[in-house]
Amino acid sequence: MLILVSNDDGIHSEGLRLLGESLRSLGEVFIVAPDRERSAVGHSLTLDMPLRVKQVGDHLFAVNGTPTDCIALGVLGILKSKPGLVVSGINIGQNLGDDITYSGTVSAAMEAALLRIPSFAVSLVANGDYRFEAAAQFSRHLAQIIMKRPLPPDTLLNVNVPNLSPSDIKGVAITSLGRRHYSETVIVEKTDPRGKAYYWIGGGDYKWEYKEGTDIEAINKNMISVTPLHLDLTDYKLAEKMKRWSIGFNPTER
Ligand code: MN
């Protein structure tokens, strides 16, 4: 079986290399990844410049694009046939709750799901002293499970692994996405040497909303979190309510 591996931290990331190694015994692993870090680019596709693919090793390709570009190019161009599995990671840093809407790591797995290929994203919940071993081992284990028990169409899995040695992990929880609350403003304004204002996004403190069964709760309990995601973002309950709002449109002449 062909397995396609990508990430958003770039081709030189240790997490990417270890993920590829851990999956190697399960099939023929191809790595197609951005040529530099592209974290938080979300699901963006490059349409305004030519994409270049550079083979940088055996089964190893660097692309001057986004994680989504890498999956599209990998599946539709570089690989000889459609892969049976796509895995994105191991991301250096969490992709919990709201994070997934920005995440290039998760978007790569989403792109695979759009192409009807089983996929998951895997992230290490850490800010330093990275321990990839548990995430790499679990990725291999989960890949084997998915091969035996295929995911339904339009779904993918988002996996977060605590930064602990494998023996300190307390188990696996199937979770829902948590929500974060920013306690302060997340826009930091500074002044540059020429007296002009500039801004940083994301400098504020945040707290996680406490809710049972979420990915953040699992991580707090030193468990691996596995969240099944669906590509259909429709809110069906709200759609039913809105049908009774009788939102009409009466065009007026100008
Ligand atoms: Mn990243």
Image (cartoon, rainbow, N blue to C red):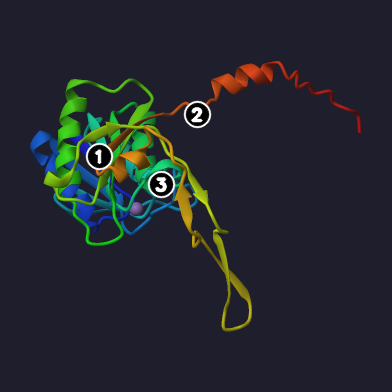
Identify which residue, 180 or 93, lies in the foreground: 180
Residue at image mark 3: 103
Q: Which image quarter holds the N terminus?
A: top left
Identify which residue, 90 or 159, lies in the foreground: 159
Q: Is mark 3 within 8 Å of ligand 1?
A: yes
Residue positioned 44% across, 43% down in the render:
43
Q: Earlier in the sequence, mark 3 or mark 2?
A: 3
What secondary structure is found at the residue carrying circle 1? strand
What secondary structure is found at the residue carrying circle 3? loop
Q: Earlier in the sequence, mark 3 or mark 1?
A: 3
Residue 242 falls in image quadrant:
top right
Kindly tell me whether residue 133 is visible in this rendering: yes
Residue at image mark 1: 224
**How far, Cα to Cα, is label 3 from label 2?**
16 Å
* Amino acid at circle 2: Leu
Residue positioned 61% across, 83% down in the render:
194
Kindly tell me whether residue 59 is visible in this rendering: no
Tell me if mark 2 has few (under 14), some (14-19) or many (20+) residues whose alpha carbon lies within 10 angstroms of its own.
few
Residue at image mark 2: 233
* Amino acid at circle 3: Ser
The outermost residue toward the bottom is 193
Q: Are marks 3 and 1 in contact (CB under 8 Å)?
A: no
* Amino acid at circle 1: Ile
Residue depth check, mark 1 versus mark 2: number of the one nearer the observer: 1
Percent of width and height locating residue 182: 52, 52
Percent of width and height locating residue 108: 35, 41
